Amino acid sequence: MNKKNVKLTLSFDGKPYCGWQKQKKQASIQGILEEILSKLMKETIKISGAGRTDSGVHAIRYTANFLTNNFSMSISKLPVILNFSLPEEIRIISAEETDVDFHSRFSALAREYIYIIYQTGHPLPFFLPYTYYRKKPIDIKKIKKACSLFVGKHNFKNFCIGYGEEGNTERQIFYFRAREIKSSYGSQTVFFIKGNGFLRGMIRNIIAACLNYADGKTSLSEIKKALKNKTKLPQAKRGQVPAQGLYFKRAYYPQ
């Protein structure tokens, strides 16, 4: 039987998991999928994902793929079969056969995330696990100014946790925007960011830097210098926003 490359699109609630990547003695999205797929295919399955996600980070349309020698069912039935066995926090949206050379991580041209901050005096409890609840008002004009600094190609050495593979900390940000949304349930500040790749903790670090600028804790000049590696922002001026407000939106691939 010919080897098949199966591409999955899935959504997950990251709250109970240590992230996408499999880790010892911790529940991960990758680990659960590999266990179920290996039983289903009756062979050892290794599944690849579009990128690592931090513990507690969610995904709206996440791309993964796996190679198998034992795929004999109708591929249209795979989401139903997998969803029957998967925990309810992980849902398969679609499955399709793809080119054998396709790799969900290395074939990706870009990745897009959103981050949600929830603001109100009396928060609705079911929003709290899926947003960053913050009482302090946000100056959206200042936030937008700070966001613009990160657009383009930069060395994000001072805005990540650890370094990338082979010490490469340069990434290109295609856009980084913030929008304020008001409703009867309170206001939300939503960040939209798309780049060719992201380092561990990078998005949560740069959003924290934008908030710190809006709060008057740091300056645009200090952020610029940190991006040019002339100085490093102190932890109090950089920090990291909570994971539960971050969502992997989608990955982009060649057409």
Image: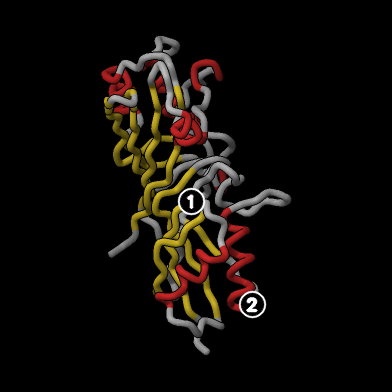
Residue under the image location 33 percent in, 37 percent down: 192
Q: Nearer the viewer, residue 92 or 47?
A: 92
Q: Is residue 23 above or below residue 141?
A: below
- The crowding category of the residue bearing disc 2, from other C-alpha atoms within 10 Å (few below 14, some 14 to 19, many at least 20), is few
Please state the horizontal and vertical placement of residue 216, each as a whole percent of the image.
40, 10
Tell me the kind of residue under disc 2: Glu
Question: Number of marks in the image?
Answer: 2
Q: Colour scheme in the image? A: secondary structure
Q: Quadrant of the C terminus?
A: bottom left
Q: Is residue 179 above or below residue 68?
A: above
- Residue 206: which quarter of the image? top left
Q: Nearer the viewer, mark 2 or mark 1?
A: 1
Please state the horizontal and vertical placement of residue 248, each as a whole percent of the image.
42, 46
Q: Contact (CB < 8 A) between labels 2 and 1?
A: no
Residue 202 can be seen, yes or no: no
Q: Which residue, given by chain and number where applicable, does mark 1 sit on?
A: 12
Q: Nearer the viewer, residue 69 or 169?
A: 69
Q: Nearer the viewer, residue 93 or 232?
A: 93
Residue lying at the far top of the rendered structure: 216
Q: Secondary structure at mark 1?
A: strand
- Residue 173: which quarter of the image? top left
Q: Secondary structure at mark 2?
A: loop
Q: Is residue 41 above or below residue 143?
A: below
Q: Nearer the viewer, residue 176 or 180?
A: 180
Q: Which residue, given by chain and number where applicable, does mark 2 sit on?
A: 43
Residue lying at the far right of the rendered structure: 25
Residue under the image location 29 percent in, 20 percent down: 140
Tell me the kind of residue under disc 1: Phe
